[in-house]
Amino acid sequence: MNKFFKNMPEVKYEGPKSTNPFAYKFYDADRIIDGKTMKEHLKFAMSWWHTLTATGTDQFGDSTIDRTYDEEDPMKVAKARVDAGFEFMKKMGIKYFCFHDVDISPEGNTFEETRNNLKEMVTYIKEKMTGTDIKLLWGTANCFGNPRYMHGAGTSCRADSFAYAAAQIKNAIDATIELGGTGYVFWGGREGYETLLNTRMDFELDNMARLMKMAVKYARSKGFKGDFYIEPKPKEPTKHQYDYDASTVLAFLRKYDLLGDFKLNIEANHATLAGHTFNHDLAVARINGVLGSVDANQGDHQLGWDTDQFPTDVKEATLAMLEIIKAGGFTNGGLNFDAKVRRPSFTYEDIIYGYISGMDTFALGLIKAYEIIEDGRIDEFVESRYSSYNEGIGKKIIEDNTSLEELEEYTLNNNDEGKLESGRQEYLENILNQILYR
Ligand code: XLS
Ligand code: NI
Ligand code: NI
């Protein structure tokens, strides 16, 4: 059990006063809040890629982090990674994980070799899962890293690249089903464009939908009952990503009649790159009934790219949890930390600290979100703000029981428009801070 995370104790809840760096201060897995345990509310998941494979490379430098787990042969490294991952999840009390095909298994020299590697790794992971309560939250295919996807995958100008992506996705779906995953994600890393001078946008979007429809048809035929997700992101790697934000993705899903099978996987740092708050994109998903799963991380206010940091911002987490609670909580989805330790944080301990910060931040967010709901002042204010629609002409408007003519008549005879009331943003912000910091 203690091969990689040596000399590090199991991480347990010790409460806010603890100074033990290897303890949760707020995440108390079995604490019941509103009839559900914290672990059921939050459904934390480990991201295979950032946690077990990412080595700290960036545009300016090589790896700073060794993730070879004392092995050299790629399949042996992949298996050691599974051992390390399960050791880590058990130590942290994390019950779910997520992966891309290439995170769990190395690419071979031919597609057939790649496919065989994946099958072998799925068998290995399945054995590891046996006898544990660790589950797969979602799987996905990395159709962006390999140079063959330089023009896109589903949106590539090359039919062979489209076909290769389809073949890869078929196998990633098989892996997801075999491991009991309840979700399958499409994050279109290269599904976008750099310039309209060489791009047929309509053609590419039609093809992207074609690929998704084939994926749904195939997965359903194999008995997959989970959700498909699109993960919106506005830019990076391409200049114009087709899945810009929650609203853009919703329009796409409606146009291509995919709403019955797809929900959204909202990522914090992607929402902020789109110029929104995290809770804005969660709210857009919620009010449209498609809030499926969440990639929890945070960006950096001074940097304009996807920094994928572990969340530490309790206010942001609280506002996010409010949306998730209002959406009725997670069913097939959960909270995946699409987050990585910083490049100079190269030790195994650093991964543990990263997850403790993310999990404590969201646990505190959950607690504070319920405190806001129980306090009731914010909800009460919002309720009263719209009260002119509870009777009279307002009621007629929201019951779709009036017309421009009637409203003109009403306005002509209305000698008393009544007084407008303050939006009270500052009053509400004071309540929020009072609850967050008491
Ligand atoms: C990249 C994405 C990616 C997806 C899965 O920005 O967040 O990690 O979550 O492909
Ligand atoms: Ni991201
Ligand atoms: Ni993500």
Image (cartoon, rainbow, N blue to C red):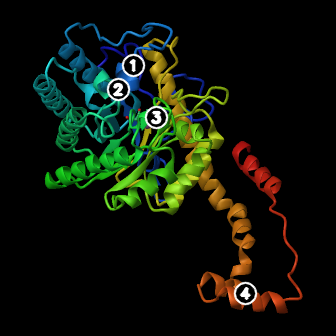
Q: Which residue is mark 1?
A: 54
- Left or right of 283 on screen, residue 30: left
| Residue 367 appearing in the image | no
- Residue at 44% x, 13% y is 57
- Residue 197: which disc? 3
Evaluate if marks 1 and 4 touch, with contact meaning CB atoms under 8 Å apart.
no
**The residue carrying mark 2 has its beta carbon less than 8 Å from ligand 1:** no
- Residue 407: which disc? 4
Q: Which residue is mark 2?
A: 150
- Residue at 59% x, 39% y is 272
Q: Residues within 10 Å of mark 1 (few under 14, many from 20)?
A: some
Say which quadrant the C terminus sits in.
top right
| Horizontal and vertical percent position of residue 105 | 22, 24
Q: Residues within 10 Å of mark 2 (few under 14, many from 20)?
A: some
Q: Secondary structure at mark 2?
A: loop
- Residue at 18% x, 16% y is 75
Q: Amino acid at mark 4?
A: Leu
| Residue 319 appearing in the image | yes
Q: Amino acid at mark 3?
A: Leu
Q: Residues within 10 Å of mark 4 (few under 14, many from 20)?
A: some
| Horizontal and vertical percent position of residue 222 | 14, 51
Evaluate if marks 2 and 1 touch, with contact meaning CB atoms under 8 Å apart.
no
Q: Secondary structure at mark 3?
A: helix
Foreground mark, 1 or 4, reads 4
Q: Distance of mark 1 from mark 4, alpha carbons? A: 61 Å
Q: Distance of mark 2 from mark 3, alpha carbons? A: 16 Å
Q: Amino acid at mark 1?
A: Ala
